Amino acid sequence: MTIINWKYCQNNSDLILATGLNLLINNPKASFEGSFDNEYGNYLISDKSNKWNYIGEAKSLSKRLKQHSKEKTSTFYKNYKKFENDFFNYPQRLNVNDFQIRTIRTNIGRKEIEEFGIVNIPAILNKFQKGKRNKYSGKIDLKIWNEIQTNFSSLIEQGEKELLKSKDYNWFSAQIPSNAGLYWVEHTSKGLIYIGESSNIFDRYDTHSGTTYFSALRRHIGENILEFYLQTRNGKKRYFSDIEDIRVTEFLKKCTIKPYAVNFGRYELEEYLIKKHKPLLNRKENK
């Protein structure tokens, strides 16, 4: 008998994701004019020749697909217009309602299904996150998928215990894996200040260790703890002065970081941890 727990999910993520993707591909198709449930899930968009075009994830399928139903706010449609001459051979440009959608409820693993699908379908209009998962040609297991989706709360709680057992590092002497996962940041006097996720924890850590422009964590430290004001340059309100940027770096020297690799369920684990532990600088989920 297979024991389904958090560690099993991390070690067998491709099997789980292949099963979820197979279910998504074979679910009934709908149009953007239809109605969709307000639930966590994944969606797959195809054109009228049933060519897979775009895969995504959402905390609310109804809100995300409403956004995609409008040409001005639809990421997939903007990509379609940009690349239609490369991938499509229709005499006239398609409009949004010429595309079809399949959806699946995903209680856990929705970001990984998106990344897995981009590589394994492949989805031609997804221009980001390519190469985040490997190609997979193994088996699928519907029973395991259903058990995982039913017992997702217990799995996330197990994930929390494993993360909290992970090693802490002083910020600038940290050993960070180049893996998808989470990172937990504490300050010597202010306690837990931030929980983040990334498809590559090392790259995100490297960004936070540099200058402020690309780092939300550095901006939050500067604005909300050190009481600096972000400056606008080239229309972007993302800068501190050089002296202030040094002060942010000095603050990070008094922080520890706990990196934790996650192959399955990192979005859901991050959301759970933020809601439960309420880090000082997190805005999303911290209510």
Image (cartoon, helix red, strand yellow):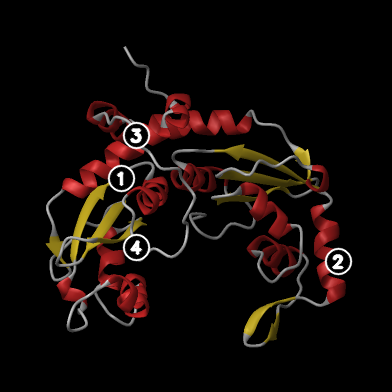
Residue occupying image coordinates x 75% and y 50%: 190
Q: Please name the residue that numbered disc 1 is placed on.
A: 106
Observer-nearest of 165 and 9 = 9
Q: Is residue 202 above or below residue 53?
A: above
| Callout 3 amino acid | Ile
On screen, residue 235 versus residue 93, left or right, reads right
Query: Which residue lies at the image location 33% right of the left edge and 82% below the top edge?
Result: 72
Q: Residues within 10 Å of mark 1 (few under 14, many from 20)?
A: many
Tell me the residue that label 4 is attached to.
124
Q: 281 or 238: which is nearer to us?
A: 238
Name the residue tied to disc 3. 16
Among numbered discs 1 and 4, the one appearing first in the sequence: 1
- Is there CB contact under 8 Å for labels 3 and 1? no
Q: Nearer the viewer, residue 46 or 229?
A: 46
2 or 1: tag closer to the N-terminus:
1
Question: Mark 1 and mark 2 in contact (Cβ < 8 Å)?
Answer: no
Instruction: Answer with the quarter of the image where residue 6 lies.
Output: top left
Q: Secondary structure at mark 4?
A: loop
Q: Marks 3/1: CA distance? A: 12 Å
Residue 246, disc = 2
Can you tell which mark lies on residue 23? none
Mark 4 neighbour density, 10 Å: few (under 14) some (14–19) many (20 or more) = some
Which quadrant would residue 228 be assigned to in this image?
A: bottom right
The image position of residue 248, as x and y in percent, is: 80, 63
